[in-house]
Amino acid sequence: MHQHDASQWQEHFTPLLEHYDFHLAEHFRANYVPLYWIMRLEGAILEVGCGSARGAILAKRLNPTRRVVAVDIDENVCKIAAKYAELAQADIEVQQADMFNLPFKDNEFFVAFSSGLLEHYSNEDIVRGLHEQLRVAGYVLVDVPTNLYYIQRGGLDYGDERQVSKSEWLYVFASSGQIVELSFVGKPPEETGMTVLLAKKQ
């Protein structure tokens, strides 16, 4: 389960509301690779562990006719996400939900995605969470930092991330589903992040 206190995320996301347009642009700059992949896919979109829901808001702007849902386990964070969506005039649904027990039907979404979420969990919980996402969506798109990201930054961002190597991430993802596409982010050989598109195992 999550290792950190959820109140830390309320403190992190609340200031983003003051200059929501600037922070939305910053999120797009940092997440253009997964957002590009989401734009290429069709059907309903689910953001898991949405935080401020900037990913879901941007997905809605890129795909205005599609249903976009954002979920987070913390009720107060969901309130922040709903306020952010209101300020950004993005017609998305925000719900409180647990990644391990999503309140949706099988295959209700075409794609579920997350950014900077999985590095807070153990390998066992990551696999369990990805299996649940692959239950409700045909594809799962994840964007995660590798251990080189933290080495370059000189430490952890939030204090509870696991510094997972590229090879370990690949092992976890391969055990969770079929890897459809894979992209490394950064300047080789120091690739600091990776975006992976998963499908259900055949």
Image: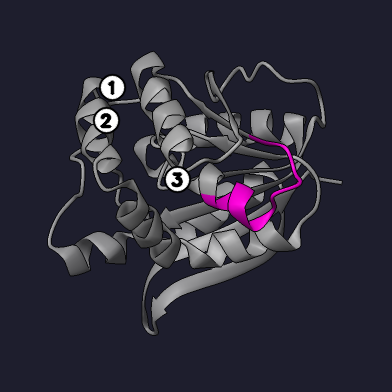
Quarter of the image for residue 182 reads bottom right
Label 2: which residue?
9
- SS for dot 1: loop
Q: Is residue 117 magenta?
A: no
Q: Mark 3: which amino acid? A: Arg
* Percent coordinates x, y for residue 172 in the rendering: 55, 47
* Percent coordinates x, y for residue 116 in the rendering: 40, 47
Q: Earlier in the sequence, mark 2 or mark 3?
A: 2
Label 3: which residue?
54
Q: Mark 1: which amino acid? A: Ala
**Magenta-colored span:** 58-68
* Percent coordinates x, y for residue 36 in the rendering: 61, 65
* Percent coordinates x, y for residue 109 in the rendering: 76, 36
Residue drawn at the location 51% of the way across and 36% of the way down:
126
- SS for dot 2: helix
Quarter of the image for residue 195 reads bottom right
Residue drawn at the location 76% of the way across and 46% of the way down:
65
